[in-house]
Image (tube, rainbow, N blue to C red):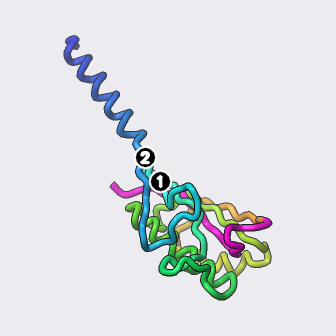
Amino acid sequence: MSFVAINRLSAIKNQMRAMSTVNKIVHTASAPAAIGPYSQAIVANGFVFCSGSLPVNPANGEVVPGGVKEQAEQVITNMNEVLKASNSSFGQIVKSTVFIKDMNDFGVVNEVYGRRLGGALPARSCVEVARLPKDVLVEIECIATVSK
């Protein structure tokens, strides 16, 4: 291999490395804005890392009325909007984490999650927590692949 070809190959490898480390901030008005110094999601290296979705109505910034079922529905709606803005979908989720205020609500949250994800079965953890932002009852974060 010539010196020129080796230099060209090295330049291509460096360019590919640089491209793979570029992070894209995701923002959509169809989901609630972040309530702190973070992004709704970040796309990096073929994955989207979604921040926790809260049961907040994006139109007015308020927690949706009702109980854990209504909150879980809104959380998943918001998560779907962020995934769509990231060029991803429920079927591309590889890992999710569900945070619930009361483990007694697991069954209700699980029913909404299973129905809304439409048969997608990503790896998942569910954790009971002492408190969530805005004193909500459920929050879900996820990691998914992105479509090219």
Where does the magenta region start and end?
A: 130-148
Q: Which residue is mark 1?
A: 42
Instruction: Tell me which amino acid carries mark 2.
Output: Asn
**Residue 16 covered by magenta stretch:** no
- Residue closest to the eye, 37 or 116: 37
Above or below, comparing residue 5 to residue 118 in the picture: above
**Residue 144 covered by magenta stretch:** yes
Instruction: Tell me which amino acid carries mark 1.
Output: Ile
Q: CA distance from mark 1 to mark 2?
A: 6 Å
Image point 53% across, 73% down: which residue?
117
Image point 51% across, 55% down: which residue?
49
Image quarter of residue 73: bottom right
- Residue closest to the eye, 33 or 30: 33
Q: Residues within 10 Å of mark 1 (few under 14, many from 20)?
A: some
Q: Position of residue 27 (x, y in %)?
A: 43, 62
Kindly state the secondary structure of the residue where label 1 is placed.
Answer: strand
The tag earlier along the polypeptide, 1 or 2, is 2
- Residue closest to the eye, 27 or 110: 27
Q: Decide if residue 41 is in sight here.
A: yes
Q: Which residue is mark 2?
A: 23
Q: Is residue 48 left or right of residue 99?
A: left
Image point 42% across, 71% down: which residue?
29
Above or below, comparing residue 44 to residue 75 in the picture: above
Q: Position of residue 51 (x, y in %)?
A: 56, 60
Q: Position of residue 37 (x, y in %)?
A: 56, 55
Are discs 1 and 2 less than 8 Å apart at CB? yes
